[in-house]
Image: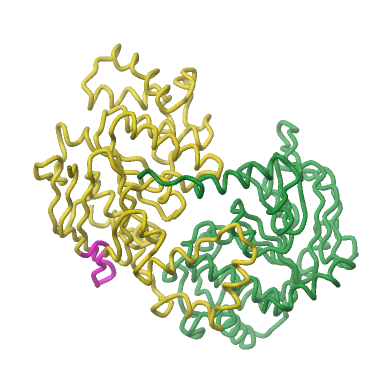
């Protein structure tokens, strides 16, 4: 059964006198206990989709239904605010640097799960255990933790609210490869234990392959391909194929083959359209940030 | 293209372009070692990978080589030679030895207030003693050399008007304007999308073949190394634990840590997905 249904989602940014369609008619559904991987490159709109679902920015148009009822993401309150949580790419930036782990975790326990101070404090150890962190870490601040530990704390903070859906926006991208695997394993384990649903936003195809039940591939605000894992194994859309072909593997011969087969100008050969001089479709990366302009 | 590379392999061993011997770097405050006895070589036309996880000291190796170690960090040992000539003194390997470096965040490395053409021209004037007009023309030609379609137009752009991949091309154009013998590329594609990454790496390989410069490619991504490098060095907590030809190291790693890195990189490939 669908936990989240998104239909006809649009998000338009007005930037330097013209419109940028970050989301241009996106439909997705996320089933209970399942993972929807959203893959695509910078500017494809995947993060915008995630932040709208998490209530961090309003859509320009479109409908969201959560657990059978319409979801007004402009004013998330009560249970929906608790039931949809988010984990970001950079834990160091998303955790409060001045809070000890304990305070980071008790805040949602008190505000969203409605526990009193003593109950919340007791739950902290359980949450740390759930993400395989030693209980002693509750007294540390984010700066005293490794990148992998920080991301575990960020996941524990999302769990503190006892959510049904977690939007994971590139949760493994800033981590070393050895840590990346462990975080993916943890997320799968938590899903199995708690029946969580995930929207897993990633540009890392290996991570998508390891986590996803369903996959959507986004390009320029639209979904160009969708399906099960076969999307990543036997892609139909040319863009998905380009994306998959570009992922470096462990085979030294692969790079030589690609270069040998590429047309003289690799930038022209790999991009269906000429390389843009102005890449406006990059709200996340641009220093000129349309998100802040509108809010 | 690839056919020219094995040929270079037979000649390159005799004269290393860059040799680092016994490099040691410590944190000044605590005296804690950051790099211990690191030695490596780059031959002309060769792309050498330097791999390790966060904190392994790979960026410190490239900073020490460029002579741009950050404050609070000190080189305590080590000898640098370029073409057999001792350049251990940082002043000897500044402009004349023609080292160029590109970084992970190209947009942060460019001056946001200056048109990119002017930034490249300034480097060309400095390193090649060109006049203003010559340097301008050089900038446009370097931009086209890195496959930016309309060099004239791109030269007039400011960094914020360009995508991340375009900014990295501009950085490479700027590096080329030094006529470098050695290019140090420190995580040059980590901040870029995979399709853009593939193009930038192909560009680096192509320019290495054309100009015969050597490249020290610093990365945490073994896939990137596999596809571009001739040889590979693995750093673990400031120690060089393994080095050798890429094909050999990936196929038959000798050090435990290299095996661990390879397993981590392949770990996700082996899972069957959640379904």
Q: Is residue A17 magenta?
A: yes
- Position of B219 compared to B111: left or right? right
Colour of chain B as rendered: green
Q: Is residue B65 above or below residue B264?
A: below
- Residue A123, given in percent of the width and then of the height, sits at 33, 17
Colour of chain A as rendered: yellow
- Position of A255 compared to A223: left or right? right
Picture quadrant where residue A191 is located: top left
Picture quadrant where residue A259 is located: bottom right
- Residue B160, given in percent of the width and then of the height, sits at 43, 67
Q: Is residue A139 above or below residue A254?
A: above
Residue positioned 58% across, 69% down in the render: B171
- Position of B73 compared to A172: left or right? right
- Residue B224, given in percent of the width and then of the height, sits at 60, 59
Q: Is residue B33 magenta?
A: no
The stretch in magenta equals A13-24
- Quadrant of the snapshot with the N terminus of chain A: top left
Picture quadrant where residue A69 is located: top left
- Residue B34, given in percent of the width and then of the height, sits at 72, 40
Magenta segment, principal secondary structure?
A: strand
Residue positioned 28% across, 33% down in the render: A195
Q: Is residue B22 above or below residue A45?
A: above
Q: Nearer the viewer, residue A259 or A274?
A: A259
């Amino acid at each position: 059964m669908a936990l989240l249904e998104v239909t006809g989602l649009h998000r338009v940014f007005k930037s330097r006198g013209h419109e940028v369609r970050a989301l241009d008619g996106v439909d997705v559904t996320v089933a209970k206990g399942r993972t929807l991987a959203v893959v695509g490159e910078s500017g494809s709109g995947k993060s915008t989709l995630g932040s709208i679902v998490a209530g961090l920015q309003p859509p320009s148009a479109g409908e969201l239904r959560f657990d059978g009822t319409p979801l007004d993401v402009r004013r998330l309150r009560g249970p929906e605010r608790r039931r949809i949580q988010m984990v970001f790419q950079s834990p160091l930036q998303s955790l409060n640097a001045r809070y000890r782990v304990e305070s980071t975790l008790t805040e949602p326990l008190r505000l969203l799960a409605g526990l009193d101070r003593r109950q919340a404090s007791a739950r902290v150890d359980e949450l740390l255990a759930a993400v395989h962190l030693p209980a002693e870490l509750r007294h540390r601040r984010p700066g005293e933790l490794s990148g992998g530990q920080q991301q575990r704390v960020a996941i524990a903070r999302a769990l503190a609210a006892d959510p049904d859906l977690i939007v994971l926006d590139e949760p493994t991208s800033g981590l070393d490869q050895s840590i990346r695997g462990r975080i993916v394993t943890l997320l799968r384990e938590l899903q199995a234990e708690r029946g969580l649903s995930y929207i897993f936003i990633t540009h890392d195809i290996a991570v998508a392959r390891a986590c996803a039940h369903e996959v959507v591939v986004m390009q320029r605000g639209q979904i160009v391909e969708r399906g099960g894992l076969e999307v990543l194994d036997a892609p139909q859309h040319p863009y998905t194929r380009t994306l998959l072909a570009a992922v470096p593997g462990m085979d030294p011969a692969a790079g030589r083959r690609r270069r040998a087969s590429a047309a003289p100008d690799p930038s022209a050969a790999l991009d269906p359209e000429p390389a843009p001089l102005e890449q406006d479709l990059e709200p996340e990366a641009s220093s000129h940030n349309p998100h802040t302009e509108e809010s | 293209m690839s056919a020219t590379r094995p040929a270079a392999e037979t000649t390159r061993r005799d004269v290393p372009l860059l040799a680092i011997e016994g490099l040691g770097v410590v944190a000044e405050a605590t005296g804690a070692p950051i790099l211990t006895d690191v030695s490596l070589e780059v031959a002309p036309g060769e792309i050498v990978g330097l791999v390790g996880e966060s904190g392994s000291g790979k960026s410190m190796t490239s900073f020490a080589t460029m002579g741009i170690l950050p404050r609070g960090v000190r080189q305590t040992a080590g000898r640098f030679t370029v073409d057999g000539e001792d350049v251990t003194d940082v002043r000897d390997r500044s402009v004349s030895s023609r080292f160029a470096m590109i970084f992970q965040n190209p947009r942060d490395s460019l001056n946001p207030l200056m048109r990119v053409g002017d930034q490249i021209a300034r480097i060309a004037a400095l390193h090649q003693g060109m006049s203003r007009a010559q340097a301008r023309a050089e900038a446009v030609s370097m931009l086209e050399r890195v496959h930016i379609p309309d060099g004239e137009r791109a030269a007039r752009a400011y960094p914020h008007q360009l995508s991340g991949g375009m900014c990295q091309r501009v950085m490479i154009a700027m590096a080329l304007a030094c006529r470098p013998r050695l290019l140090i590329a420190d995580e040059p594609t980590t901040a870029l999308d995979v399709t853009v990454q593939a193009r930038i790496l192909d560009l680096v390989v192509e320019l290495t073949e054309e100009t015969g410069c050597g490249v020290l490619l610093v990365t945490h991504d073994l896939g990137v190394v596999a596809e571009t490098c001739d040889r590979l060095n693995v750093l673990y907590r400031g120690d060089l634990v393994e080095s050798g030809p890429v094909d050999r190291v990936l196929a038959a790693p000798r050090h435990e840590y290299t095996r661990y890195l390879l397993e981590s990189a392949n770990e996700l490939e082996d899972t069957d997905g959640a379904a």
